Image (cartoon, rainbow, N blue to C red):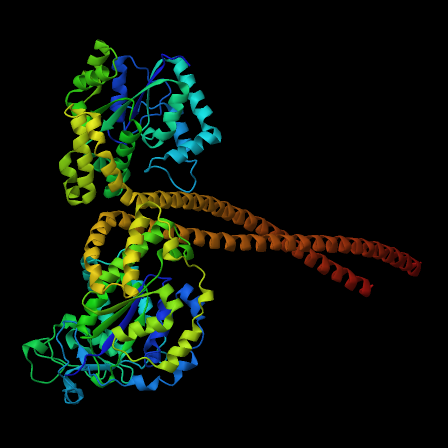
Amino acid sequence: MNKKDRVIVVVGPPRSGTSAITKGLETMGVSLGNTFIPSNIFNEKGFWEDADFHGFNGFILDFYEDRLRRILSIDEEEATHLLQCGYLSVASELLSNKLSENHLLGIKDPRFSLLLPFWRHVFNHCEVDVSFVIALRNPSNVPASHEYYKNQHYEKSLWVWISYLLSCIEYTQGTKRSVVDYDELIKNPKYQMERVAESFMLPLLPKVLRSYSCDFIDPSLRHFYEEQASHLKNSSCYTFAFEIYEKLHAVATDRISFEELEKSLPKWKTQFSFVKSLLLLEEKNNQSIHQLMEINENLQTTNKDQLKTIIDLNKTIMEKFQFVAGLHQNIEQRDQHIAFLMQQQRGS
Amino acid sequence: MKKKPRIILIIGMPHSGINLLSRGLETMGGFLSHIIDTNVDEESAMLDGTSQSPVFLQDSISRYLRDPNKILTQYPTGYSAFRGDRHEISELDLAQITLHYFPPKKNRNDSVFHSLNWEMLHFFQERHRCIISITKKEIALLKNEGFFTRATQLLLEQMAHKSPPARIFHADHDEEAAKADELRYVMKSDDGCMSPYGPSKNVSLTQEPSDFPASVVDEDAISELVLHDPLFTLLLPFWKQVFQKCHLEVSIVIAFRNPWSVAASKKEYLEKSFWVWISYILCCLEHSNGYQRVFVDYDELIENPMHQMTRVAHTLDLTLEQKSLASYCEYIDPSRRHYHQALEELKSEGFYQQFTLEIYTKLLEVTQDKKPFESLKKSFIKWKKAFLEANDLLVLAEKKDATINQLQEKITNLDESIYQIQKTINQNSHSITHYKKETDQRESQIAALIQAQSALDKELFQLRQTSEIQNCLIAA
């Protein structure tokens, strides 16, 4: 591995502007690769997410069969277990392949946030210079966005938001990192890219920056506004999320340092640990539902196949029945003929 | 001063020894015929043996059928009719009211309360109500659906063991229903309202048509009743209102058990089991407030049933029957307890287990008489506050439980359907084999017939030839 290889990882909760930030990395000459997962109606401007990293992250998250790992980050023990199971070499190979094409690589997948304890080992092992951009969005807007797209439980969306960000804060300690607030990015994309470039000591490409600021970033990208989630404001979860948001926003607007922010981390972790068991239960329930839906689908297919078999068998039965009826008729005709002949013979 | 009739409710989480406690209550003067077996708690049933009632109870059954306290009736509107008595009922202008008597129940040991509780908990379909107690809003919904009237009538019906309660229908409102119930009298009042307790109306006794049918119970017929069902716990805010309307004294026995043992005996996610435990305990603490109440720990009960029954009897002002108690103590066998962990051995992993351990330890101190019940008050406020933080995620867990249940039901139905279809396929395959066999047989029959026919043809041909020769000879 080339010691000059550098990776910039965009982390943060889903629907926090990770895609827009990732695209912005191109203004610093960062390559995002060329095999992206396809855009969809939820993100028409593209996810800018490398399909191979996306696939690999999904694969290791599914390693834990008892839970649908989409809320809580893995812990150190689980990360060690993954390393022992041989995933270190797989991840390292994947990273090396990508870096062989581009020595300054930008990768994004919100699920990196949950897998940071594992990926930290991979980055160390590959001896790459890793930096993190933490995407931040007002918690009032994130659940609303979630709700709109995925019909999620409001409160749960907030806990997911908290879980992702606590993991990002904790597991990016000791690295070069920057927080970018989504609303600030929409307001002034140029300034935000300049901030990131400065903290990562990367030169900006003026032409690309202009195109990004003027053409790519569009205020309409901010689909949801605070007012829409106002009913959440009385919940303790919202208060907690907002406390985290305010501190992170202060970092994003350069009012406080990361060190200042980290002072609150132990308290937040304690507060979070109270509901951790319920989020774990939610992951387990989701896994059960996922498995049951799969079974249900398989059974429905079997059921459909069986019904088709029954139709075929009924058809065969009908054919056989008709054939037997024909034979009956045949026998009857023969019997009549024989009787006639016998009668004739007797007459003779 | 007359004492109000009393209901003794045994509540708590499933697998906490509720059935065992209800048997224990029988040592306090023969509640046997009044204990409604509303629930079969697997764990307790295992320990109880779900056997026939022990001999020690038999001698005390009849004495407790009589209760000096009197209750006449209650109305859904809450107007008390305690002041009335049997004479007043007999003086009622029966021509003005519709009266229908409930058929007497043949078997009192039924599960009517459990069924009603189950129905109420399943009324909220999008959530599998197994964790959180019902809210005020939900109580209002239940009332709208008529559950309150049903619960009240059921309770009175079960309590009035000597003479069944009467149902009073309002003529304008319920005439058809009343007729369908073979009513005896129909009232037509001028203003659409009625007073069942006499021809002279006054405001306090006037009932709105929507309040009917109401129940009327002979006050002499009411006596104490012991009910036990874990489902009462989550529905306690609702039942409290029912008890209040019925003007009943309420005593509550709260069964609880080491949460680690409960988790070990249940086949569900550990996290869920602990949170259910916390929720049940907090619900019991909150909604039993203001009533005569006593906590009983399962392990303490198993280890020293005599002491625990004495505690219960003392708290509930009941008299223990020594002979029955001795039999009960003999009946309890600690060796049949499958899961048990001493407090000192418990290891709490994670915040939720620490939280559980804190509550459990405090409750044990109370049940071991180390601290008074009042000592829990302060802690309760703190616990409740913490619990509310988790409330929304617990609602989510209930919703997910409902989804899982629905999917499991779908899968069971599909499994059944597939089994039936497979059966049909097998039958059809069998039919095809049968038809194939029949076809083969018929084909060989036909072949034989063809052979026989050609033999006959041949014979016939020879006969014709012979006949022709004979005819020629005759002609010659």
For this view, does B58 lie left or right of residue A44?
right
Residue at point 41% right, 19% down?
Answer: A126
Q: Residue at the front extreme? A: B370
Write down the quadrant of residue B434 in the picture.
bottom right
- Number of numbered discs visible in the structure rendering: 0
Q: Residue B135: image x %, image y %?
A: 21, 58
Which quadrant: the N terminus of chain A?
top left
> Relative to A61, does residue A283 appear above or below in the rendering?
below
Q: Residue B409: image x %, image y %?
A: 40, 54
Q: Residue B354: image x %, image y %?
A: 31, 49
Write down the quadrant of residue B289 in the picture.
bottom left
Residue at point 40% right, 35% down?
Answer: A77
Viewer-proximal residue among B330 and B168: B330
For this view, does B126 lie left or right of residue A305?
left
> Relative to B419, does residue B329 appear above or below in the rendering?
below
> Relative to B81, does residue B242 appear above or below in the rendering?
above
Viewer-proximal residue among A173 and B196: A173
Residue at point 40% right, 76% down?
Answer: B328
Q: Residue B56: image x %, image y %?
A: 40, 81
Is residue A139 visible from the viewing direction of this image? Answer: no
For this view, does A10 lie left or right of residue A97?
left
Is residue B2 visible from the viewing direction of this image? Answer: yes
Which quadrant: the C terminus of chain A?
bottom right
> Relative to A30, does residue B75 appear above or below in the rendering?
below
For this view, does B395 lie left or right of residue B412?
left
